[in-house]
Image: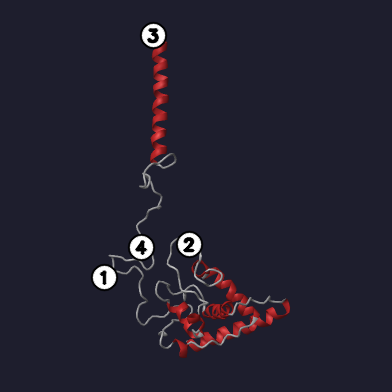
Amino acid sequence: MATNKRKFGFWSVVGIIVFSLFWVALLSGNILWTSDTPPLQIIDDMDNQPKVKGQAPSSFFADGKATRDPIEYTVPRTGTKYDVSLDEADTKNINTVPATPEVLARGKNRFETMCTPCHNHDGKGNGLVVQKGFANPPSLVRPEAIAYTDGKFFHVMSAGQNIMSSYADKLSELDRWCIVHYIRVMQKGGTVPAVSQSTSSSDKQTTAQAGTAKTASAQ
């Protein structure tokens, strides 16, 4: 009789442990979960922290915007402040960066890094985020885009347009002009020439001088 009690007690403990582990695994989502609701998290480790994202609405501020505008009469500590309107873009944004092989290679690199998620590698607007359901941006190789001035392309990258936000904080002025040159290559259906070792250093110096001159004139 005593032996049976000991066996019953042992298997009871085992059953309680198995039952507990089952519910822990079920509620944590580690085994079959038949609901679309998120699993119960006792400690969510900041997976679901309260925050707002860029261009999202927010009830915290009076204007309802999560993204805050720069404080009036302030300037960034690095770079320059872009204050050109769309109407002024053609006359105030002047491309002084030469379309050297180094510039085109740099523009290709920056375009593929920052622009292809939406615009794709061919500039036609079917990037990976679009394939995931994001709005399709206009093609950069359509006739209307070909008619854009360099200054207008620079303006769109600097100030944003429609659902595209500004990239002025992500791309320097020089990088934006390099991308403009690369877009022109795509529009003509061409390819970026290879940069040789002999021309690389001189082109880098020319590009850096053009970028410095542009920044100085903007300031």
For marks 3 and 2, give the one nearer the viewer: 2
- Give the Cα separation between the discs numbered 3 and 2: 70 Å
* Drawn side of residue 162 relative to residue 112, left or right: left
Q: Nearer the viewer, mark 4 or mark 2?
A: 2
Residue linked to disc 1: 62
Residue at 43% across, 78% down: 159
71 above or below 20? below
Label pair 3/1, CB-CB below 8 angstroms = no
Question: In this rendering, would 22 be left or right of 192?
Answer: left
Outermost residue toward the top in this view = 1
Say what secondary structure mark 4 lies in.
Answer: loop
Q: Which residue is mark 2?
A: 131
Mark 1 neighbour density, 10 Å: few (under 14) some (14–19) many (20 or more): few
Going from N to C along the chain, the mark reached first, 3 or 2, is: 3
Residue 152 % position (x, y): 47, 83
CB contact under 8 Å: marks 4 and 1: no
